[in-house]
Image (cartoon, grey):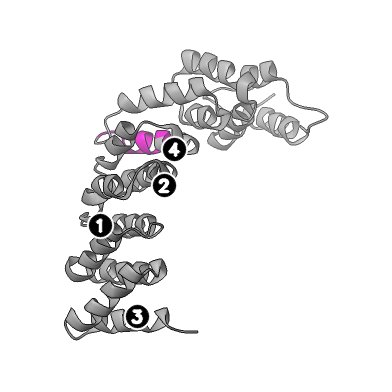
Amino acid sequence: MNEVANEAVLWERLSKASRRAPLDPAWLGEVYSPSLSDELRHAIAEKIGMLAERGWPLIQKLMDQYGPQDELIMAAGLSHQPESRTWLMKHLRSIDPETEPDRALLVLQSLACWGGELPLSLIEQTLEMPGMHLRLAGLQLLNFHAHLLDDRELLRVCNKLLKDFRDPVALATIRLLQRRNGTAITERLAQLTMDGSDPVAAAALKALGCIATPASQRWLLELSQALPEGDRRQMACKQLKQQYRT
């Protein structure tokens, strides 16, 4: 049987799987091979990952045999096992994000389901990574962990991100901060309206409007008078007016 026909047989077997007729884990391990097409390898690895506690030992075996292939890293995340989380964290520390940014991003994405359980030190490490997509992936982890931090600690962690020269990083950080309504948060957002880029200032003003506390309203009032004439001042006035609509 040629390679294309063989893959067609495997696809058919995968498509017929159901709760009543689940795939045999041993069969999945036998048919997986790095020589298969990328799409089929990922489909098989996904099925293995979804096996949870039965899938992780098989993932380990395949990684011992073939190395940490991308689809096996993805499967480790899908398995949601404490042991797979430990392995992913260890693997992340072995990666140089400067030379392997795609591999680092894949591991971060695979760790996303454990964001609230990861140590803050690891999350802060990801937020120091140079690539924009890596920092955004780190922010996803922080999103799940943020409820464990008070406002001051969260601002400390986010400080460099708010100063990132790439607007998408700062904007994603503002979206995280606007879930809080503490005075320290509103003060930092108000500062961004004055010294941030135009997109960052606009996002900070909208965040102050969304927070809608007496403190954020006082800042909007002050900014509507203190900001120079222009778009930022007009937006501050607009956000302030929306606070008092009935």
Which residue carries the number 1 mark?
166
The boundaries of the magenta stretch are 99-107
Residue 143 is marked as 2
Q: How crowded is mark 1: few (under 14 residues within 10 Å), some or many (20 or more)?
A: few
Which residue carries the number 3 mark?
240
| Nearer to us in this view, 28 or 233 | 233
Q: What's the residue at 43%, 22% (across, down)? A: 86
Q: Which is in the foreground here, disc 3 or disc 4?
A: 3
Q: What's the residue at 27%, 79% (across, down)? A: 221
Residue 121 is one of the magenta-drawn residues? no
Q: Which is in the foreground here, disc 1 or disc 2?
A: 2
Q: Do the residues bearing badges 4 and 1 touch, measured as CB atoms within 8 Å? A: no
Q: Do the residues bearing badges 4 and 2 touch, measured as CB atoms within 8 Å? A: yes
Q: Do the residues bearing badges 1 and 2 touch, measured as CB atoms within 8 Å? A: no
Q: Residues within 10 Å of mark 2 (few under 14, many from 20)?
A: some
Query: Which one is earlier in the sequence, the residue at label 1 or at label 3?
Result: 1
Q: Do the residues bearing badges 3 and 4 touch, measured as CB atoms within 8 Å? A: no
Helix, strand or loop status at disc 2: helix
Q: Which is in the foreground here, disc 1 or disc 3?
A: 3
Question: Is 44 drawn above or below residue 221 in the view shown?
Answer: above
Residue type for callout 1:
Arg
Query: Which one is earlier in the sequence, the residue at label 4 or at label 1?
Result: 4
Query: Which one is earlier in the sequence, the residue at label 2 or at label 3?
Result: 2
Query: Which one is earlier in the sequence, the residue at label 4 or at label 2?
Result: 4
Q: Which is in the foreground here, disc 4 or disc 1?
A: 4
Residue type for callout 2:
Asn
The CA span between labels 4 and 1 is 23 Å
| Nearer to us in this view, 148 or 195 | 148
| Nearer to us in this view, 231 or 48 | 231
